[in-house]
Image (spheres, grey):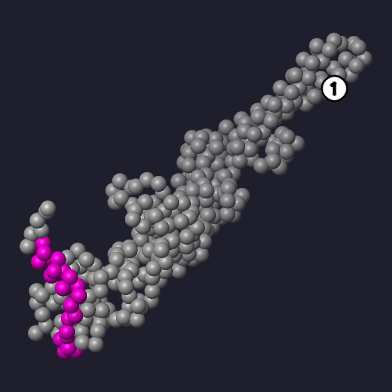
Amino acid sequence: MHKISLFAICLFISTQYALAQEITLSEIQLKQLGIVIAPLPPKQLGELTGIPAQVVIPSNQLYTVSAPLPAMIEQTLVGVGDFVHKGQILANLQSPALAEAQRSLLQAYTQSQLAQENLLRDEQLWKDGIIAESRMRMTRGAHREANASMSERKQSLKLAGMTESAIRQLLETNNLSSVLAITSPIDGVILEKNASAGQRLDAASPLFKVAQLKPLALEIQTPLANVRNLKVGANVTIPAFNAKGKITAIGQSLSGGNQTILVRALIREGTENLRPGQLVEASIANQSSGNAQWNIPNSALSRINSKAVLFIKTSSGFRTEPIILISEGAQNTVVSGNLKGDEKIAIAGVSALKSSAMGIGGAE
């Protein structure tokens, strides 16, 4: 049978006494000790508050606009922060490679027309029994090959930024141009600009970053202990910026540095108050057991022998009330406990009350 030390027994008794006793103080003593009293905040059901998060752009709303061909920048028409529309010209480039690609298309088009004429002629000759079927099949294969070559050249020009109408005009007029217009792929905002007039570019050199800023995403670093009560679709708010959204994904691996889980949310309301890269504090509605919770200022919390407590105002002073810490933030902490909701608590001068409760000091 294990022996229990006298020190452990005394410690247990002193702890229970400290948590159970009432501290008697007069109004004068309250002022002398700097003790401030405030009503218990309104209770809330299942909400984690004060969780650090960062505003980001959803990956499917961010586009990089690059130079499709080697070129020189002739003119830029937009700057960082400008709102642009889909198809709006962002910059004009001079590209000899574009003229060469247009020439290749015209050449392929001519070959396709000639192959079409040869096919029509040989089909008629085969029907009249003048040529063998093998020759007609060879002519048909040459026609398909010419059409495939023309389609390839057309696709190359589309990738270079030419529209279907511009390609049709090129085939009708045979006028080559080395001017390459770079357009926006979406309605959005210019986030980055890596282009300046006179700059020479290689193919695929990035010129602009364009993004849609509504909705925005939120990456929330959530403590592991709180993740089990979170569900995809739960409400997320950013109280300081009046923004709202819902959880879209919950990570499965821990971050190496702070042992948190990355939770992603999509913010659809209040995005105009946020900026990509901004650091904020978020609140998340969880699926807890339904016990009422309170968002308490950290200054009201105290620990007596590893037990978290609040100091509740009574008619003659204060009593200690054990609580459970749900989520600790930089300024506030969400707690639950045996509280009615109409109590008044000490939010300043708590250290003096703790000393009195543990018998270290007392009100004079």
What quarter of the picture does the C terminus occupy? bottom left
Residue at the far front: name it: 1
Q: Is residue 304 above or below residue 178?
A: below
Q: Position of residue 70 (x, y in %)?
A: 52, 34
- Locate residue 218: give its quadrant: bottom left
Q: Is residue 28 above or below residue 97?
A: below
Q: Main secondary structure of the magenta part?
A: helix
Whether residue 142 appears in this view of the structure is yes
Q: Is residue 147 above or below residue 279?
A: above
Residue at the far right: name it: 128
Whether residue 273 appears in this view of the structure is no
At x 62%, y 33%, the residue is 156
Horizontal side, residue 330 vs residue 183: left or right: left
- Locate residue 133: give its quadrant: top right
- Pick the residue in front: 256 or 95: 256
At x 74%, y 23%, the residue is 144
- Mark 1 residue type: Leu
At x 47%, y 60%, the residue is 234
Horizontal side, residue 117 vs residue 364: left or right: right
Horizontal side, residue 191 vs residue 102: left or right: left
Q: Position of residue 73 (x, y in %)?
A: 51, 42
Residue 306 is covered by the magenta coloring: no
Q: Position of residue 93 (x, y in %)?
A: 55, 41
- Pick the residue in front: 264 or 58: 264
What is the magenta range?
7-29
Q: Position of residue 63 (x, y in %)?
A: 51, 47
At x 91%, y 12%, the residue is 129
Q: Circle 1 is placed at which residue position?
A: 120
Which element carries disc 1, helix, strand or loop?
A: helix
Q: Is disc 1 surrounded by few (<14), some (14 to 19) or many (20+) residues within 10 Å?
A: few
Residue at the far left: name it: 6
Q: How many marks?
A: 1
